[in-house]
Amino acid sequence: MSDTVTHLDFETRSAVDLNKAGAYRYAMDPSTEVLCLSYRVGDGPIQRWSPGDPPLQVARMLAHNAAFERAIWNHTLGWPTLSPEMQDCTLARGVAVGLPASLEMLGQVLGAPVQKDKDGHRLMLKLCKPRKVHDDGRIEWWSDVSDLDRLAAYCDQDVRSECAVDERLPRLSGRERAVWELDQQINDRGFALDVSRVQAALSAVTEAKRRADRRMWRITEGKVGTCSQTGKLVGWIVERGIPCASVAKGEIDEIVLLADLFDDPLVEDVIRLRRSAARSSTAKYKAMLDCVCPDGRVRGTLAYHGAHPGRWAGRLVQPQNFPRVDDPDAVEAALALLHRADAVDAIEAVVGPPMEVLSKCLRSMIVAPAGKKLIGGDFSNIEGRVNAWFAGEHWKLDAFRAYDAGEGPDLYRVMAGEILDKTPTDISKVERQTTGKVPELACGYQGGLKAFQKMAYTQDPPVRVTDAEARSIVRLWRDRNPGIVASWSELQDAAIQAVEA
C-alpha cells in the first residue's frame, strides 16, 4: 500500500435523520446525495470533487469519523469498495487517548492552528435537510448557489482541520489498530432483524401505551391525560395528601410505600401504570425501524472507545442494554401471540403486563440469517477477575480457578452467602443477582453506600436497600477484600506520580 494519504470530507443531504438512522441506513437511502467532496493528497493543495466527476482513486484515506465517509463512499456513491484497512481515523485516535470525539473540540484541545468553521457548520446543518417534503413525497431542497459555494469552502476547511489534527495525534498502536479495524468490520456487517416481528411488537407497544393513557385519564378523572404528563401526575398525587416532588424512576418505590401507608390504592395504581408505560426499552422497537437497512440488518451499533476506559458504547438501538431475560418461556409465549389482531389482550391474559413483557422480547428481534446460528457468550465476572488480579487478592483468584475447573461455586454465590449467612449452594438465582453480583460490581471499584443503592435499584425488579443495610454490606465486602481496598490508594498514588513525572 502506498504511504500517500488522501485526507477527505463529504458534505451530504438527505430526507433521513442521520442521528436516528445512523450512517449506514442514511447512506443507503435513495434520498441521500453528496453535495461536495473536498480532499488533499499528501501535502498537496485542497481539491474538490463534484457530482458527475470520475470516482476518486485512493490507496489510503484519512477522515474524521472514517465510518461515515466509508458508508457514503461505498453505499451512496457506489465506488470501488473502501475497506477499514485502507483508512485512518482521527476520531478513533483522539478518543483512544481520552480526547473529545468532535472535530471542533479536538482541534481546540490540541491547539491546532486550523480550527473548524463554526459559521459554515450552521450552514451545513441547514443544507443537509430538506426545505420541504410534499405530500406526494417530492423533496424540495435548499439550492441557493451562494450557499452551496459557501458549503464547499466549509468542506475545504474541515479537511485542513483534519490535517492539522492528524499531525498532532499519536497513531494507534498495532494492537489497538487491529481492535479498531475489527470494530469497523463488525459495524459494517451488523446483525439481522426480524422486521415483521419488530413491526408487530411496535404496534403492540403503541396500543398498550394508548390503553395506559386512557386508563390514567379514567383513574384521575381527566386531571392527568397521559402517562407522560409527569407534572400533572405529581400535582394529582399531592392533591390526594401524599408528599411527592417527582415521579422519576428512583422515586417510584417510595411513592408506592407512601400510598400504602396512606391507604390510597388509586395512587398505587397510577404509579405502577406510569412505571410500566415509561419503560424506555420499548422505544427501541421504533429505533430498530428507524435504522434498519434495506437488507434487514442494523449496522453501526458499536462506538469504539465510547467510554473513557476503552469500553465500547452502544449506539442507535444499543443492543448491550437490552433487558435481561429471566423467563425465556414467557418470551416464547409472547412472541407466538404478537401477530394476532388482539395481541395486547392475548399477552396480558397469557403472559402478563404487556409493556413489561414486550420489553423482555427485544433480544428476540435479532435473528440469524438463513443457514446461520446465533451463539451467545459473555465473560464470567470479568470485572471481579481483573480487579482481583490487579490487587493480588489471592483467595479470590483461587476461588475463580476452582470455579473454572468445576470444583467450586461462582463468586457471586460466595459473596451472597457471606452477606446472607448461607452456604453458596443455598443461594437462589435472585439472591445471586441482587445480593452477590451487585456488591461485587458496586464495591469493587471503590463504590460506597450510594453506589451500592443505585446499582441495586437498577436491577429488574428494582431492589431498594436502606442506608443501614447498604452500609453493612459495603463494610462486609471491604473486610473480605483487603487487597482490593488497599489497591485503591496505591493506584491513585501511581496515577498522580505518572502525571507529575
Image: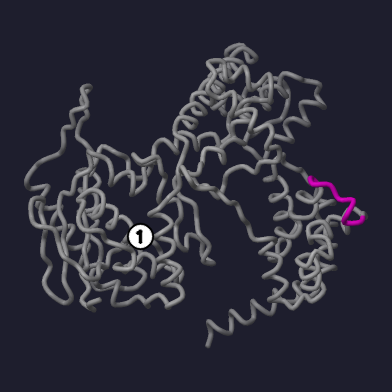
In the image, residue 439 above or below residue 325:
below
Residue bounds of the magenta highlight:
423-430
Neighbour class for label 1 at 10 Å: few (<14), some, many (≥20)? some
Q: Position of residue 491 (x, y in %)?
A: 65, 77
Horizontal placement of 437 versus 179: left or right?
right
Asked if residue 161 is positioned above or below residue 231 in the image, the reply reads below
Against 403, residue 363 (above or below) is above
Question: Is residue 275 at least partly visible in the picture?
Answer: no
* Residue located beneath label 1 in the image: 102
* Residue 183: % across, % down: 44, 61
Q: Residue at x 59, y 35 (%)?
A: 361
Residue 62 placement: quadrant? bottom left
Q: Residue at x 48, y 32 (%)?
A: 198
Instruction: Evaluate whether residue 60 shows in this view.
Output: yes
Q: Quadrant of residue 58?
A: bottom left
Is 89 on the left or on the right of 30, as rendered? right
Nearer to us in this view, 467 or 417: 417
What is the magenta segment's predominant secondary structure? Answer: helix
Between residues 449 and 83, which one lies in front from this camera angle? 83
Report the number of discs. Answer: 1
Q: Is residue 287 magenta?
A: no
Left or right position of 333 against 25: right
Query: How far from the left and from the top, in percent, is residue 464?
Result: 76, 43
**Residue 152 image point, x, y percent:** 13, 55
Tell whether 305 sits left or right of 412: left
What amino acid is at disc 1?
Ser
> Foreground: 191 or 97?
191
Q: Looking at the rendering, in which quadrant would you find the N terminus?
A: bottom left
Secondary structure beneath disc 1?
loop
